[in-house]
Amino acid sequence: MFRQLIFALLLSMLCLPARGAKALPVSPGDRVKVTIPEGEEFSGIFEVNLNGELELPFIRGIPVAGLEPYQLQERIYQALVRDGYFQPSYLKVSVNVVQWAPAEVFVSGSTFQPGRVLINEWTPSEQTTAPVAQGGQGAFNRFLSVALRSAGGLLPTANVSAVELIRGQQRRVLDLSGVFTGEPFKDVPLISGDRVVVPDTGQENPLIVRPSQITPVGVKIYISNLTEPANSNATSAIGRDATSFPYGSRFSHAVVSGNCAGGTILTNAYRRAVLVRVDATTGKTTTLDKGVEELLRRSSSNENNPYLMPTDAVACYDSAVVNFSGVLRILDQIISPGVLLYDLFTP
């Protein structure tokens, strides 16, 4: 038996593809088609169970989670020879993945929405339709970039060159800088149970604050415009398009979009705008109060003109001249009825 196992191992190694070739590893829930000539009882479509094992008839569970298809083929070959069902020289095994399952991945660190994400989810038709028994199907939504995007995308302070992938006892550090530079990068396939950790540098990196495969496409904020020259957001044409911005837009863009800037210099130049932000991690609320003209003309730092983040709120306030004008109108409304009554009752 020992000689048979050695022979089987050598034979399977000769039949394996080059080790440099990388394929998507199998994960719990994946369905594979096993074909064995003159071994129909071991052939068919099988699903990797929640323990990451493949259960063939008469064979105890074979650990396969994280293996590439050719490695899975080797494991089945060894199991059948080991248990004495086939002679090494007469056994041929073919394995094809016919349906890639959703994968549960845990993302932590410097992302907008860290936590558990489910990638490569099946469509309703895939959930009810039997898998097609053919190979060559790609699972393009089972990769690292998809998991990061599903976790809200990277924060501006993320260390994009040292993203950690933890699979069982193995830890791997990946450099994803190529997403932003156009250089090749390793967008590795994931399996259920993988952990992704994105380190935080504590400093904003302007190079990654833009739409990409691993950052948000845009941000949605809330704007309250000034009362002059209009009394509502609707009449100021502040609608959906005016509150949705490409990721990488700044406070000044929201001020202009909210009709807080421009107009008559004498009456409008001293308007003010306030940015209200709630830290998603700590729940702390911070505010930034800036003069509109100062923000547009003399704000050149991230501290004075920060990037817009999801759920930011921007409020605009009228200038002192407009405020004084409003006070005069109120006084006029109070005094005018009194004068009218005085004229009526005075002979």
Image (cartoon, helix red, strand yellow):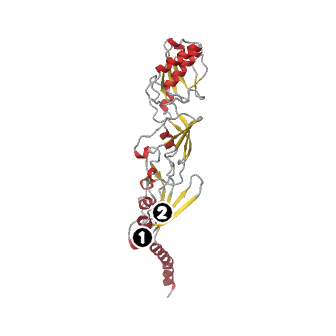
Vertical position of residue 337 compared to residue 235: above or below? below
Closer to the eye: label 2 or 1: 2
Vertical position of residue 133 compared to residue 105: above or below? above
Q: Position of residue 107 (x, y in %)?
A: 55, 42
Q: How crowded is the residue under tag 1: few (<14 C-alpha within 10 Å), some, or many (20+)? A: many
In the depicted view, which residue is nearer to us: 309 or 268? Answer: 309
Q: Which mark is residue 268?
A: 1
Q: Amino acid at mark 1?
A: Asn
Tell whether 213 sits left or right of 198.
left
Q: How many marks?
A: 2
Q: Label 2 vs label 1: CA separation?
A: 21 Å
Q: How crowded is the residue under tag 2: few (<14 C-alpha within 10 Å), some, or many (20+)? A: some
Q: Position of residue 250 (x, y in %)?
A: 45, 57
Q: Amino acid at mark 2?
A: Asn
Q: Which mark is residue 325?
A: none
Badge 2 is on which residue? 304
Q: Quadrant of residue 50?
A: top right
Q: Position of residue 264 (x, y in %)?
A: 38, 70
Q: Earlier in the sequence, mark 2 or mark 1?
A: 1
Vertical position of residue 61 compared to residue 160: above or below? above
